[in-house]
Structure formats: C-alpha cells, structure tokens
Image (cartoon, helix red, strand yellow):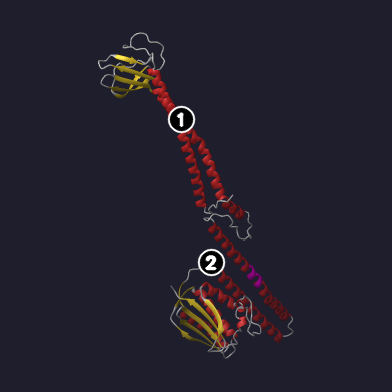
Amino acid sequence: MPRVAVTHSLRGRLLWFLLAAISMAAVAQAMIAYRSALYDADQIFDYHMQQMALSLRSGAPMTNSSSGPMPDAENNDLVVQVWTPDGVQVFRSLSRAALPQRAVLGFSNVKANGTTYRIFSVQTANQTVQVAQDMAVRQRMAGTLALRTVGPIAVMAPVLMLVVWWVVSGSLAPVSRVRRQVAARQADDLSPVSENGLPDEVRPLVHELNLLFGRVRTAFDAQQHFVADAAHELRSPLAALKLQILSLERAPDDVARAVAVGRLTSGIERATRLVEQLLVLARQEASNANEVKLAPVALADLVKRTLGDMAGIAAARQIDLGLYHADDVNVAGQPDALVILLRNLVDNAIKYTPAGGTVDMEVRRSGTGITLSVEDSGPGISPEERERVFSRFYRVPGSEAGGSGLGLAIIKSIAERHGAALTLENSERLGGLRVRIDFPAMA
C-alpha cells in the first residue's frame, strides 16, 4: 500500500486532519439526518393516513347534533366535521372532543377537553369542512424528532473530540520530544538538538537554537583555550621572577645586587605587560561576543593622537615615526577599541624595527572604503609565517624583539569587530612589513 505523504507543517497538518475529521463527521451526520428525516416523514405520513382512515372509515355514526349520549371515543387526536351551507352538520368523526359547532375559516386554536386543538376550516359551494388536531400529538412528535436529531450529535461529538485530541497530540509530539531533550540536558551539554520529524513552524526555531549552542560552545572552547594559554605563558615569567628574587637574596655585594634588581624590574615590567595584553584581549573578545553599537569616528585624528603618544618610545629607540598621508575620513567604530588597535600596530612596528629605522602611518580613502596602513623598515615577516602570527602567544622564530605574542591577535580581534579586513604584506617603499586594514565605507 502506498503511503500518503503528510505535510510537516504543524498548521497544515492540524488543518488537514481536523478538516478531514469535520468533513467525515458532517457526511456521517448528513447521512444519519437524511435516514432519520426519511423515517420520521414516513411515520408522520403514515400517522396522518391512519388518522384520516379512522376519521372517515365506513360505518362511522352520522349525527347533526352534539347532544345525546356519545359512544366510546375511538379517535380524539384528529376530528373531522362537515356542515351543509345552511348549517346542518352532516358528518362528524367518532370522538368525545366537544368542539364548537361553528367554523372560523383558516387556521385557529381552540381549547377543549382540557387541551388545545389546532383547527383548519375551509368552505366550498356545497359544504364546510373542519379538521381539528390535538396539539399534544404535535408536541410529542416534536420531542421525538428532537431526540432523534440530538442523538447522532451526542454520539459524534465525543468521537470528534477524540479525533481532535489524537491529531493535536500527535502533531505536537515532536515539540514535546525537543522539550524533554532540552530539559534533560546538563549545563555543559551543548550538542545539537535533533531536528528529525519537527513541524515546519518549529524546525527554524530548533535550528537557531542549535546555532546558538554552537556559538556558545565555540565561546566556551575559546575561553578554555585562553585560560590554558594564559596559565602557560604566565608560568615562565613568574618562574623567572622567582629565580631573580633568589639571585637578589644571594647577591654577595652591591654591584651584583644592583644587577639582580635591574633584572627583577625588567621581569616585572614584562609580566605586567603580558597581564595587560591578556586583559585587553579578554575584553576585546567579550566585546565581540556582545554586539556593541558603532559610531562615526574621525580616524585621522586618532592616528595623530596615537603618534603623539608613541613618539617618546620611538625616539628612545631612534625610530623615525611619522604620518605619511592622512585623508579626513570617518569610520564606523568604537574610539577606545580603535585606539588600542593603533597603539598595538605602532608598538609592534617600533619593537621589530632596528634602531635608526622608519615607521610610517597612512590613512587613505579608497573606492570601496578606507585603508589604514602601518609600514616599517624592519625585517618583515615571511609569507609562510603571516597566518600563524595572528595566533595567541606566537612569536616569529629568530626574532630578537621581546613580547607576549598577543599584539596581532588583539589587532585582528578589533578589526573583525569593525568588519575590517586585516592583511600583512611587504612594504615596497620601506622594505619591511606593511600592515593594511581595510574598513568598510560608512552607510
């Protein structure tokens, strides 16, 4: 037997099953009503035929007066009387009903014998005919018809309720299954929820829930990796500080003590710088997870301010730090985050450029957006290392400059939050590394 494909839409499934159930119930009700109406019509017409036969049967006594003793009544439900044009009653059916001996043409109601009769009178050229029926007969028949009409409804209503309950329960069963799956999960269980058999209206919600689980799982994994990397990187400087303290305690004279103090001070500065970089990176990644509203920022002004702040460090290393070109442009961003990005760009360039070298910054408006670049005359980075330097705590092998290996990771995190593309390339003008950041044009 071929299986009928049922829609996966919750709305469509409920409508299809419920409309089918209502249609079948309506057809069944119509068939039952037709059979019942046909039976009732047969009963009514048979009853009237019987009553007419009893009223007009051969041998019924004729009388022209209502006085005198009446024989036993045989038919009080239907009474027939006939008068001549001069008012003489020529026929009266056998009945004890004391009806008025006058006819009101048309329909009328008359109370007699403790009940109400419905009377119809008609006059012709040679006689007047009056037919009277007890209203109690109609009331009993109406009650019987009502019971026969309500009976099928009373039977079909529970059946229809069971069908509705079965359809709704079956249609919502996948939703209940998903609810049970989510309720039974542990706090650290971020595996996807099964989407099999879900209605079309619920599947997008579960799909988005699975995407959310994926993003949360990625964030948790990144946090765990960050904590593990930070603990690993902090272990070495802290161990070095401990050794330097021991060297300070064992210094035999003032000269050795001064050397030990200098080394301890340098170690503390490196550890402080590492902790600061870790905090900055953690803050930037938290900002990436929480969408922050961006506002127009004058990029050239931030570049000039950063150059002023870093001028002392560049002068101490005999680095020529300057602004090669600056267009007056705005980018959509966060001023504080962009300042951190610029400071790390300049700090990295100064750190890896030999004494007497050059570091230049440039801001240009391009056809597709705004380009920020930092060029230096240092050794640069080989093409095969350019993707790896964005990893946390990674340092280029053979590099003499110290550092935590977090600068470019922080720069990349901030650039991604601003929707900018970060590219490392050779500087054709200075011969070292050129870091280019392409910001999208403001809408």
Q: In this view, does 371 lie above or below 92?
A: below
- Prevalent SS, magenta region: helix
Name the foreground residue: 37 vs 437: 37
Magenta-span inclusion, residue 259: no
Q: Position of residue 172 (x, y in %)?
A: 55, 50
Looking at the image, which residue is at 48% across and 46% down?
Answer: 19
- Looking at the rendered image, the disc whose residue lies closer to the viewer, 1 or 2, is 1
**Quarter of the rendering containing residue 43:** top left
Question: To which residue does mark 2 refer?
Answer: 290
The numbered disc on residue 39 is: 1
Q: What residue type is labelled 1?
A: Tyr
Name the foreground residue: 357 vs 116: 116
Write the start and end of the magenta stretch as one range. Answer: 223-229
* Label 1 – label 2 distance at C-alpha: 76 Å
Q: Is residue 220 above or below residue 116?
A: below
Of all residues shown, which one is farthest toward the front?
58
Rendered-image quadrant of the C terminus: bottom left
Looking at the image, which residue is at 52% across and 52% down?
Answer: 10
Q: Where is residue 251 in the image (x, y as percent from the top left)?
A: 73, 83
Q: Where is residue 80 in the image (x, y as percent from the top left)?
A: 35, 19
Left or right of 212? Residue 441 is left
**Quarter of the rendering containing residue 138:** top left
Q: Which amino acid does label 2 sit on?
A: Asn
Q: How crowded is mark 1: few (under 14 residues within 10 Å), some or many (20 or more)?
A: few
Q: How crowded is mark 2: few (under 14 residues within 10 Å), some or many (20 or more)?
A: few
